[in-house]
Amino acid sequence: MTELVKILGIGIAGGSLALMLRRYNAAYAMLVALALGVFMLFSLCDMLSAVISQVYAITSIGSLDSAYVAVVIKVIGIAYLSEFGAQLLRDSGEGAIASKCELAGKVFILYLTLPIVGDFVKLCLSITEAL
């Protein structure tokens, strides 16, 4: 909980600084926002690694294939990173590029999930053939 309060406090302070700088120099405000975002992202790395460890522990209990879990974790990471990049671009006034960033994230997610979709189709076909 204290980590969250620390990250939110830094976010509010950095956001206020960026807001004040935007009046005088938009480029510096963008750099502050970018640095703040990267700092906040790296501040969450320890927590994210703990979450990933817990997810793998849960899958080992349920004897699920860890390859599927790895894909799910990658998909979640891609979604968060593409959203993070898109929001930074929108904050800097580059809405068109932000949309392309989101599109790139969606294409990567599709690319990662196609093998799982193929496995699912094979499973469905084998079930229908068994009937």
Image (cartoon, rainbow, N blue to C red):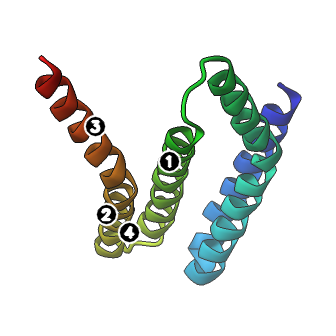
Q: Amino acid at mark 3?
A: Phe
Mark 4 vs mark 2, CA separation in Å: 10 Å
Q: Amino acid at mark 2?
A: Val
Q: Amino acid at mark 1?
A: Val
Looking at the image, is mark 4 or mark 3 nearer the viewer?
3
Q: Is residue 83 above or below residue 4?
A: below
Circle 3 packing at 10 Å, graded few (<14), some (14-19), many (20+), is few
Residue at figure coordinates x 70%, y 38% from the top left: 52
**Relative to the observer, which residue lies in front, 9 or 25?**
9
Q: Can you identify the residue that label 3 sits on?
A: 120
Looking at the image, is mark 1 or mark 2 nearer the viewer?
1
Residue at figure coordinates x 54%, y 44% from the top left: 67
Secondary element at image label 2: helix
- Image quarter in which the C terminus is found: top left
- The disc, 4 or 2, on the residue closer to the chain's N-terminal end is 4
- Left or right for 101, reference 53: left
Circle 1 packing at 10 Å, graded few (<14), some (14-19), many (20+), is some
Q: Can you identify the residue that label 1 sits on?
A: 71
- Image quarter in which the N terminus is found: top right
**Relative to the observer, which residue lies in front, 89 or 47?**
47
In the image, residue 29 lies at what x, y percent? 63, 73
- The disc, 4 or 3, on the residue closer to the chain's N-terminal end is 4
